[in-house]
């Protein structure tokens, strides 16, 4: 009877292991496809065309290599796993950060572009011709985005659809105002140059206020990162002064629990501080 029970237990464990393997494999495959699709699409918005398979393979290899090196140097397997996971999810964070910076650069270029477009319209140029002249003289990313608008029109896409695509790539309030003004002007006409000048003045005033807010809240953001880094710096110093007293924190499950709680509370504190100082204008 004991052998029969052990046989059933072994079969049950084997079935559970196979189901877990299939589930984990399916989840990993879905994650791979999603990362490849989303990251590639976002990079294409930056006019960066990278093979998604090479990007995924490089990310996996780099994550595993860093995890193994960290484990070998520190002797802490959990530290290697944490760093490996951080590197594994880092591309999405980096792409999102690059997207925000590019959107901010585009918004910063819009007021000057609108004033130049209004001047060209007052001089008698058409909307699309004026956009083409300004695009040739502008810097990236504005030249890239409006250059793509012009290329879409050459392929037969309507002006309104190309403007909608521009807003989809650059989803900001400034772009929305520009797209709405241009679409209304193409449908019903009107004094577009005056409208564009007013939008440019509004955007310039808004950007000045945002700059002042960023300057005033920079100290609060710096305090968040300094306060978050102090406990970890203190851990390193105490570990150098008395490694024996700090060893339970690194090599005992209770110490790992304390570290997990510390990381959770630090992340919560950083999130709350950044939420407070993040003032939307």
Image: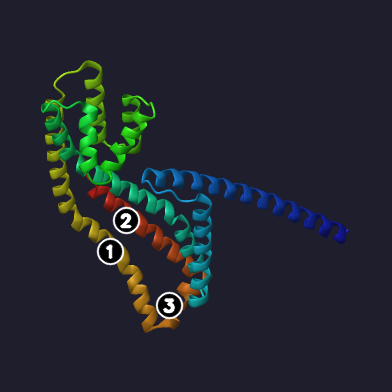
Are dots 1 and 2 in contact, CB under 8 Å? Answer: yes
Which is nearer the N-term, disc 3 or disc 1? Answer: 1
Instruction: Look at mark 2 in the image and give the residue it sits on.
Output: 269
Secondary structure of the residue carrying tag 3 is helix
Residues at marks 3 and 1, CA–CA distance in whole angstroms: 21 Å
Among the 4 quarters of the image, the one containing residue 147: top left
Which is nearer the N-term, disc 1 or disc 2? Answer: 1
228 left or right of 250? Answer: left
Among the 4 quarters of the image, the one containing residue 260: bottom left
124 left or right of 277? Answer: left
Q: Residue furthest top?
A: 188
Classify 10 Å Cα crowding around label 2: few (below 14), some (14-19), many (20 and above). some
Secondary structure of the residue carrying tag 1 is helix
212 left or right of 61? Answer: left
Question: In this orientation, which residue lies closer to the viewer: 42 or 14?
Answer: 42
Write the residue at 29% across / 49% down: 101
Residues at marks 3 and 2, CA–CA distance in whole angstroms: 24 Å
Q: Is residue 25 above or below residue 114?
A: below
Which is nearer the N-term, disc 3 or disc 2? Answer: 3
Instruction: Look at mark 1 in the image and give the residue it sits on.
Output: 227
Q: Position of residue 184 (x, y in %)?
A: 23, 21
Q: Position of residue 212 (x, y in %)?
A: 13, 48
Which of label 3 and label 1 is nearer to you? 1
Quadrant of the frame with the C terminus: top left
Secondary structure of the residue carrying tag 2 is helix
Q: Position of residue 107 (x, y in %)?
A: 23, 41
Are dots 3 and 2 in contact, CB under 8 Å? Answer: no
Instruction: Look at mark 3 in the image and give the residue it sits on.
Output: 246
């Amino acid at each position: 009877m004991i052998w029969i029970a052990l046989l059933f237990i072994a079969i049950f464990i084997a079935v559970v292991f196979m189901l877990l393997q299939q589930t984990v494999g399916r989840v990993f495959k879905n994650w791979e496809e999603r990362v490849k699709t989303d990251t590639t699409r976002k990079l294409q918005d930056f006019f960066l065309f990278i093979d998604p398979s090479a990007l995924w393979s490089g990310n996996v290899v780099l994550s595993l290599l860093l995890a193994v090196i960290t484990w070998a140097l520190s002797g802490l397997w959990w530290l290697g796993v944490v760093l490996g996971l951080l590197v594994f999810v880092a591309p999405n964070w980096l792409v999102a950060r690059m997207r925000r910076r590019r959107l901010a650069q585009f918004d910063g270029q819009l007021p000057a572009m609108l004033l130049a477009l209004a001047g060209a319209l007052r001089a008698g140029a058409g909307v699309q011709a004026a956009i083409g002249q300004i695009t040739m003289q502008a810097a990236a990313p504005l030249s890239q985005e409006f250059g793509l608008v012009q290329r879409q029109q050459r392929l037969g896409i309507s002006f309104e659809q190309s403007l909608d695509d521009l807003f989809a790539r650059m989803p900001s309030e400034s772009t929305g105002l520009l797209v709405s003004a241009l679409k209304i002007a193409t449908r019903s006409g009107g004094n577009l140059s005056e409208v564009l000048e007013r939008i440019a003045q509004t955007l310039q005033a808004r950007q000045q206020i945002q700059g002042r807010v960023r300057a005033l809240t920079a100290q609060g953001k710096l305090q968040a990162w300094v306060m978050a880094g102090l406990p970890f710096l203190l851990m390193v110093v105490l570990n150098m002064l008395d490694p024996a007293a700090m060893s339970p924190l690194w090599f005992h499950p209770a110490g790992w629990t304390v570290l997990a709680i510390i990381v959770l509370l630090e992340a919560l504190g950083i999130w709350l501080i950044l939420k407070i100082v993040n003032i939307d204008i």
